[in-house]
Image (cartoon, grey):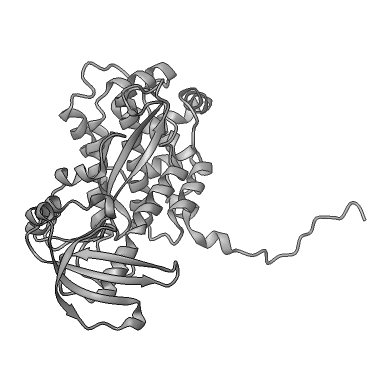
Amino acid sequence: MNGGKSIFSQLTDFLPWTQFQECVARYQGDYKLKSFSCWDQFLCMAFAQLTYRESLRDIEACLRANQTKLYHMGIRGRVSRNTLANANSVRDWRIYADFAHLLIQQARTLYRDEEFGLALQQTVYALDATTIDLCLSLFPWAYFRKRKGAVKLHTLLDLRGNIPTVIIITHGLIHDVNILDQLTFEPGAFYLMDRAYLDFPRLHRLHLGSAFFVTRARKRFDCRRLYSAPVDRTTGIICDQIVSLTNFYPRKGYPDKLRRIRYFDSAQDRRLIFLTNNFTLPPLTIAQLYRSRWQVELFFKWIKQHLRIKKFYGISENALKTQIWIAVSIYVLVAIVKKQLQLEGSLYRILQILSVTIFEKTPIFEALSLSNCDLELTTPCKQLILFH
């Protein structure tokens, strides 16, 4: 039975409040605060993400219009635009980053048996980065080009459930390949990367970590063929070779053998060359694995369209990272709710329903369930016709 709780309050019940307080204590987020705690800040920013608020003034106006409901939503402090702006710029963004990682671990446990299109037991990650453009005059710390500012979201996406396991926020000038230095590779897992990450010393470190990579070769790729395996050209595989690098510096960076697979994509009428350190999987599976890398591109498109990470409520670096990490927490929270309640709808549909029912006191499963959408009117309309 629903005890009169709003949809927002029922949604936040899925959040581990005790672990959130541990993250706050780790960085002394509530030190010497008399009102408007870090939890209040998180709930206000979560409300802004769920209801697509445009600005701090918009957040303040909407929440103050529902002043009598804030206590039952868990917001104890007085909501003020200046207070929220100060909290976003001053309180350590790592509080919300650590909390997002806790939610990510919970989500990965729920989705560990999820299928992603290939019958593989190993964990498969897609690594990529997306750029968020910023106004350089407002964000001078995010220097990217001469007249342009930007930050990058470097993301390692677990394809089972499309859960972001690692997110690193950097300035726009940081090259994608440098993120490989900050990753700890999981033995036996597959890492799918595009040509921006083709750096042989870094890939060799991944290889020595007993992990596998699948990437594309650049147009100028010099190698020596050691062995060619027979292939079925009807599947699109042109050749499956074991090669070694010939040039001095690439060979010094990656002295071991590589597997080179040429594949013809009939849908786009182009030839692709894949490089991997896995010598056991069929060549067609390697090509299909790389095609799965597109899921990270769809993830970036989804969060940019449906979360508030392109327009920001503050201009400081701390405020920007706080907003991004809370947005990631909301994305993962919705994924957790979808799995635990066994909902059939997409994450997009769940977010859209939440945005218009946030203050309703309907049981959350009933509000988000698809069963109510297929009901048909079985009784005739008895409204009298006034005009003919």
- Count of residue discs: 0
Pick the quarter of the image with the C terminus.
bottom right
Q: Where residue 169 appears, x then y in whole percent?
A: 28, 36
- Residue 196: x and y in percent read 27, 50
Q: Which residue is most to the right? A: 388
Answer above or below: position of 242 versus 10. below
- Foreground of the two, 81 or 281: 281
Q: In this view, does 96 lie to the left or right of 206?
A: right
Q: Can residue 87 be seen in this view?
A: yes
Compared to residue 4, the image places residue 246 above or below, namely below
Residue in the foreground of this view, choosing between 166 and 65: 166
Q: In which quarter of the image is residue 240?
A: bottom left
Q: Is residue 352 left or right of residue 285?
A: right
Residue 285 placement (x, y as % from top left): 27, 73
**What residue do we see at 27% from left, 41% from top?**
100
Q: In which quarter of the image is residue 140?
A: top left
Query: From the viewer's perspective, is residue 60 above or below residue 388?
Result: above
Residue drawn at point x = 37 percent, y = 46 percent: 331
- Inspect this view and state whether residue 36 appears: no
Report the side of 227 relative to 66 (left or right): left
Pick the residue in front: 155 or 27.
155
User: Residue 246: horizontal and vertical position, in percent?
Assistant: 12, 61
Q: Which residue is drawn at 37% across and 23% down?
A: 139
Residue 72 falls in image quadrant: top left
At a point 23% along the width and 24% down the height, the residue shown is: 29
Depth check, front residue: 93 or 75: 93
